[in-house]
Amino acid sequence: MGNTKKNRIMVIGAGGVATVAVHKCAQVPHVFNEILVASRTLSKCEAIQRAIRKKYNREIQISQVDADNVPELMMLIEKFKPDIVLNLALPYQDLHIMDACYATGVHYIDTANYESPDNPHFEYSWQWAYQGRFKEKGIMAVLGCGFDPGVTNIFTAYAQKHIFDEIHYLDILDCNAGNHGHPFATNFNPEINIREVTQVVRHWKKGRWIETPPIIEEGSIHFTFDYPVVGKKESYLLYHEELESLVLHIKGLKRARFWMTFSDNYLTHLRVLKNIGMTRIDGVEYEGHTVVPIKFLKALLPEPASLGTMYKGKTVIGNIMTGVKDGKTMTRYIYNVCDHEEAFKETGTQAIAYTTGVPAMIGAMLVMTGVWKGTGVYNMEQLDPDPFMEALNKYGLPWQVVKHEPLPDTM
Ligand code: NDP
C-alpha cells in the first residue's frame, strides 16, 4: 500500500448494515482510530454520526459520495487516506469501488457480490477477475464478509479445519423468526432482496448445479426444520452466493444447499407483487416518466434500517455439515442465535443488519491489524477462521457446535 497505516476506515453506504458496522467500529477505537461514512444521502450519514456521538462520545467524519463515480470515490479516498474501504452500499457499486481501491492502493471488503442493475444475476466472476490487479498492487479484497455469505463460509472453514477430515454434505439454514409488525417489509435492501428471492433456485449435487423453481412458484422445494430456540419453521431451498465459492474451495463436497425461512404472509405478498408486475426491473412509461417498478416499490416499503423499532424475536443462522473424521461419518451443526430487540438496543437497528454489520467490522479489524494478510481477492473460507470465530464470540454473535442428525437428500 502506498500510505502508511493510519487505522482509518472508510465505510461506503449508510443503510442498516452500515449503521451496525459503524457502531461496532466505534466500539473498538484502538483498531479504528478514524472513521469516515460516505454515502449518497448525506442526511443518513449525519444520523449515524449523531448516534455515534451520543452513544460513544466519538466524532466520526461524513461525506456525500456517488459510489458509481470512480473519480469522485478516488478523490475522497485520496483525501481521507483510509487503510480499508468497507463497501456497505449495494452490489451494483462493487466494481466501481474495487476500481477506486485498485487505483488508490487500498484494501477492499464487501458483504454481497456484484450484480448488474439490468440483470438480476449474481456471481463472483466479475470480482474474481480483479485477482491479478489486486495482487500486483499488493492489496487485499475480502468478498462476502457478512453473515451469509460471510460467517457461513467461516463456519465451513472452521469445520474443515477442526472437525472433519472431509465435509461431504453442507446445508446452510437461515431462519428469521422475528416479527417486525409491518404487513410486508424486507430485512435488507428491498430491491436486492426481491431480486434474490425471485430467482430460479440452484443447489450443488455431484459436481453440478441442479435447478428448481423459485420459492414463490409451484414445485418449489421446502421442508419444516426444527430450529434451536425458535422451533419449527418452513424452510425454502434458495440459491445463495456463498455456494459458488464454497463448492470450489471446500474439497470433497458432494452436495451443498441453502435454505431460508419464509412465512406464508411474505410469500403471498411477493407472489401478488410479482403477478402484477411490481417486481419488474425494466423501465415502464408512466405519464411522461420512466418508472422502474421495483425501485418504486422500494420507495414505498419501510427502510430496512427502520424496522428495529418494533422487531421482536430471533434469527438462527448456521450450517449442518456431514462428513468423515478418522473414517467415521458424523454430522455437526454450527449456528448463531441473534435477538432483534437486543440488536436494536445496541445499535438502533434489527438483527439482519446486526448479523451482517458485525462480521463486516470483524473482517475489517482482522485486515486492519494484519491478522489476515494477503494480496489478491479472497472469499472468506480461504482465510484463517480461528481469529474470526473468536471475534464473533467477543463482538456479539456467539456460536455453538452441536451434534445433529444428517439432513435427507430429498425433502
Ligand atoms: P440499504 O439499502 O439500507 O443501504 C444501502 C446504502 O447504500 C444506502 O445508504 C444507500 O444510499 C447507499 N448507496 C446506494 N447506492 C449508492 C451510491 N451509488 N453511492 C453511494 N451510496 C449508495 O441496504 P442494507 O444496509 O440493508 O444492505 C447493505 C448491503 O449489505 C447490500 O449490498 C446487501 O446486499 C448486503 N447484505 C449482505 C448480507 C450478508 O449476510 N452477507 C445480509 C444483508 C445485506 P441511499 O440512502 O441514498 O439509498
Image (cartoon, grey):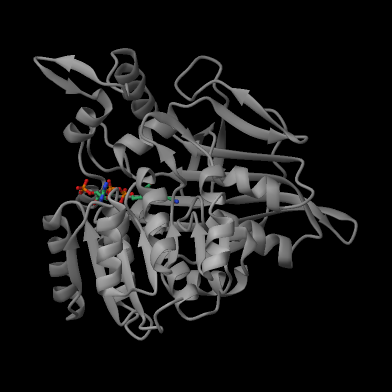
Location of residue 2 in the rendering, given as x and y in whole percent from the top left corner: 42, 77
Q: Quadrant of residue 48?
A: bottom left
Please provide percent x and percent y for residue 325: 83, 60
**x, y percentage for residue 377?**
56, 59
Q: Which image quadrant: the C terminus? A: top right
What residue is drawn where x is 56% and y is 66%? 136
Q: Above or below — where is 251 with respect to 342?
A: above
For the point 29% across and 48% down, the residue is: 68
- Residue at 51% in and 14% down: 218
Evaluate whether residue 248 shows in this view.
Answer: yes
Q: Nearer the viewer, residue 36 or 343?
A: 36
Residue, x 13% and y 57% (percent of image)?
Answer: 42
Vertical arrangement, residue 404 with respect to residue 269, above or below = below
Residue 25 falls left or right of residue 326: left
Residue that lies at the very extreme toward the right in this rendered image: 327
Q: Which quarter of the picture shows residue 162?
A: bottom right
Q: Is residue 165 above or below residue 366?
A: above
Location of residue 132 in the rendering, given as x and y in whole percent from the top left corner: 59, 58
For this view, does 265 lie left or right of residue 211? left
> Does residue 348 appear in the picture of this structure?
no
265 relative to 173 in the view: left or right: left
User: Horizontal placement of 12 versus 44: left or right?
Assistant: right
